[in-house]
């Protein structure tokens, strides 16, 4: 309630502008020579009110302007009050003010509809893509999603985490395409990952299961076999709680970056696999890549919406270069820095969705 009251004070303060304008025009018009008529300037008062007020406020300013115009006519021409000239000015003022009130009503209705759309999209995103847990066993994690469409706030980029008996499994991916179809495909893959990440002991078997799930989803009753048209790039990782390297399978996805001592290193992918859902590449063989991940390291996973973001000159965002020297141990603070730097690089608007996951160890690996 206090926030609402605090936010309403500037609006009521701004009302002094059109009210002062009405008073000034009225006084000057009454004192002006007979051949000077300033009454038409009164329309400026209701005209500027929509900048900070709603239809009721605009209607109030319009009523005050009509009263002022009537007073001007009565005072300036006492022998002929409300002459044809003054009546024409009042009618014009009423017509313009009515148009402004209608505009404000339609604007508020549009704003209400937009707020409802944003609420629904945010709710859908929380269902499809719930926030990543901050603590994952001995790991500390944070995730960030930046939608290209400000009103949508949801798209085809995805991420998820699952705890197993021996570690943590992560997935980050990007659905080819946009709109609700991409959201459906992202939900399909995330559902398959959450269901199988605990069950499949081998990482290659898990990825094979995800690929089969995506392929089945693309041949559903309403899909008509979208092989080649829709696929999902993804990286699946298995981070052990105990001492040992991170195991990774990359399915056509940008490689992770490990920030060690402020120096970024892009993980080499020696055995890349095709994207998930490529029906023409049946039963691909998944081989596991490994890389070290120590207590002082920060692991960054991302989608191509980050590295392919362009500035005004068309230059891609140099992720590794821009994070060099960063030594944050808090993944959320690190992602907040990357978010601000990325949006500054592109001028505040992304052309594609972008997702990032940052992971650090809160304790040394168990022996």
Image (cartoon, helix red, strand yellow):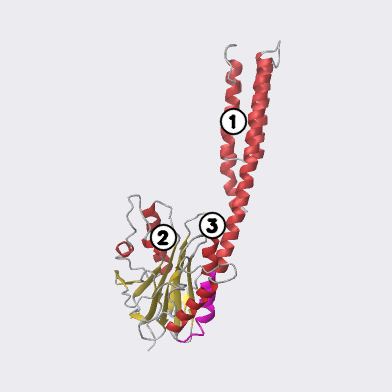
Query: Mark 1 to mark 2: distance in Å?
Result: 42 Å
> Can you tell which quarter of the image residue 119 is in?
bottom right
Q: What is the secondary structure assignment of the residue under circle 3?
A: loop
Q: Where residue 16 sits in the image (x, y, percent)? A: 58, 34
On screen, residue 53 versus residue 200, left or right, reads: right
Q: Residue at x 70, y 12 (%)?
A: 78
Which residue occupies the foreground of this view, 326 or 108?
108
Which residue occupies the foreground of this view, 334 or 3?
334
Mark before the other along the chain sequence, 2 or 3: 3
Magenta segment includes 352: no
Question: Residue 45, labelled with which disc?
Answer: 1
Q: From the viewer's perspective, is residue 220 above or below residue 196? A: above
| Residue found at the far bottom of this picture | 367
Query: Mark 3 to mark 1: distance in Å?
Result: 36 Å
> Can you tell which quarter of the image residue 128 is in?
bottom right
Magenta part, dominant SS: helix
The image shows a total of numbered marks equal to 3
Q: Residue at x 31, y 65 (%)?
A: 320
Mark before the other along the chain sequence, 3 or 1: 1
């Amino acid at each position: 309630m206090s926030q609402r009251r605090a936010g309403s004070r500037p609006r009521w303060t701004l009302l002094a502008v059109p009210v002062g304008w009405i008073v000034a025009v009225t006084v000057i018009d009454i004192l002006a020579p007979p051949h000077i008529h300033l009454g038409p300037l009164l329309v400026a008062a209701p005209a500027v009110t929509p900048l900070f007020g709603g239809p009721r406020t605009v209607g109030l300013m319009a009523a005050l302007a009509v009263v002022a115009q009537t007073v001007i006519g009565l005072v300036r021409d006492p022998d002929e009050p409300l002459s044809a000239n003054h009546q024409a000015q009042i009618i014009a003022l009423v017509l313009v003010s009515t148009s402004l009130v209608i505009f404000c009503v339609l604007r508020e209705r549009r704003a209400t509809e937009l707020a409802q759309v944003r609420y629904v999209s945010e709710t859908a995103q929380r269902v499809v893509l719930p926030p990543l847990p901050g603590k994952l066993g001995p790991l500390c994690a944070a995730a960030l999603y930046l939608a290209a469409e400000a009103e949508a706030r949801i798209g085809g980029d995805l991420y998820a985490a699952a705890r197993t008996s021996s570690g943590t499994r992560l997935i980050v991916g990007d659905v080819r395409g946009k709109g609700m179809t991409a959201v459906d495909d992202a939900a399909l893959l995330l559902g398959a990952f959450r269901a199988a990440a605990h069950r499949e002991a081998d990482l290659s078997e898990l990825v094979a299961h995800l690929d089969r799930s995506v392929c089945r989803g693309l041949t559903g009753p309403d899909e008509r076999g979208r092989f080649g048209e829709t696929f999902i790039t993804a990286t699946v990782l298995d981070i052990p709680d105990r001492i040992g390297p991170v195991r990774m399978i990359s399915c056509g996805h940008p490689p992770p970056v490990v920030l060690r001592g402020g120096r970024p290193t892009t993980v080499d992918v020696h055995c890349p696999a095709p994207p998930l859902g490529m029906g023409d590449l049946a039963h691909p063989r998944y081989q596991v890549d490994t890389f070290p991940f120590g207590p002082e390291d920060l692991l960054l996973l991302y989608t191509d919406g980050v590295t392919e973001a362009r500035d005004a000159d068309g230059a891609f965002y140099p992720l590794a270069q821009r994070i060099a020297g960063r030594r944050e141990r808090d993944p959320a603070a690190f992602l907040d820095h990357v978010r601000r730097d990325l949006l500054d690089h592109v001028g505040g608007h992304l052309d594609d969705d972008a997702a990032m996951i940052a992971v650090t160890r809160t304790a040394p690996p168990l022996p």
